[in-house]
Image (cartoon, grey):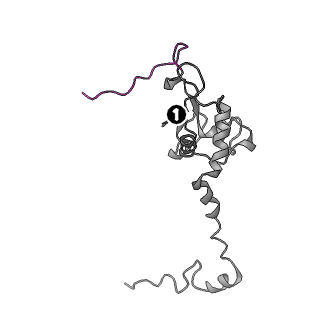
Amino acid sequence: MAAAGPVRTNWHPNMKHSEVERWICIYPAYINAKKTRQEGRRLPKENCVDNPTYVEIRDVLSVANLHFVVENKQYCREKSREVQFRGRVRVQLRNADGTLCNDEFATRESIMKHVASKIPQLKTRQNKPNEPQPQPQSSGAAAGSSGGGGGGGGGGKKGKGKRR
């Protein structure tokens, strides 16, 4: 018989701060600038980022040397059931004796503000603004070259394939 994972119990006041159930939860919706307060945003819009993912939150927290766990959970206010909107990150705020793990982060808001400020600096975010730029090929010369070829790119005669 295989050994089972750690047993998860319900929260009670006698639990130590080092137990995963006492760690704070961060859903991507908490720091999403495109969400309203009713949809779950917890910070002011100027402190938030557009459409963060749990992977980006994980990357920022790993650099900040915080203990965290990624869980495959759906935020209850999220309307979409797609996989890209799933994910929750639990972060350890305090040690077992109640002292802060990192003096820089005293509250859950300070962790969320830190994460939201660092996500735009990630390399994955640096490449995203450059993606929409390859479209400006609709200059006068490019528009005339497509001629009567049936539109779109490649030039030449379209739809001429094999005869049957």
Left or right: residue 44 versus residue 7 is right
Q: Nearer the viewer, residue 96 or 44?
A: 96
Q: Residue at x 27, y 29 (%)?
A: 2
Q: Quarter of the image containing the N terminus? A: top left
Q: Classify 163 as above or below 119.
A: below
Check disc 1 and report the residue beneath it: 67
Residue 8 lies in the magenta stretch:
yes
Residue at position x 55%, y 35% from top?
66
Quarter of the image that includes the C terminus: bottom left
105 relative to 122, above or below? above
Residue 10 coordinates in the image, percent (x, y) = 49, 19
Q: Position of residue 28 (x, y in %)?
A: 60, 40
Q: Is residue 77 magenta?
A: no
Residue 35, image quadrant:
top right
Q: Secondary structure at mark 1?
A: loop
Residue drawn at x 75%, y 44% as measured from the top left = 46
In the rendered image, the vertical position of residue 22 relative to residue 160, given as above or below? above
| Nearest the eye: 35 or 30 | 30
Magenta-colored span:
1-16
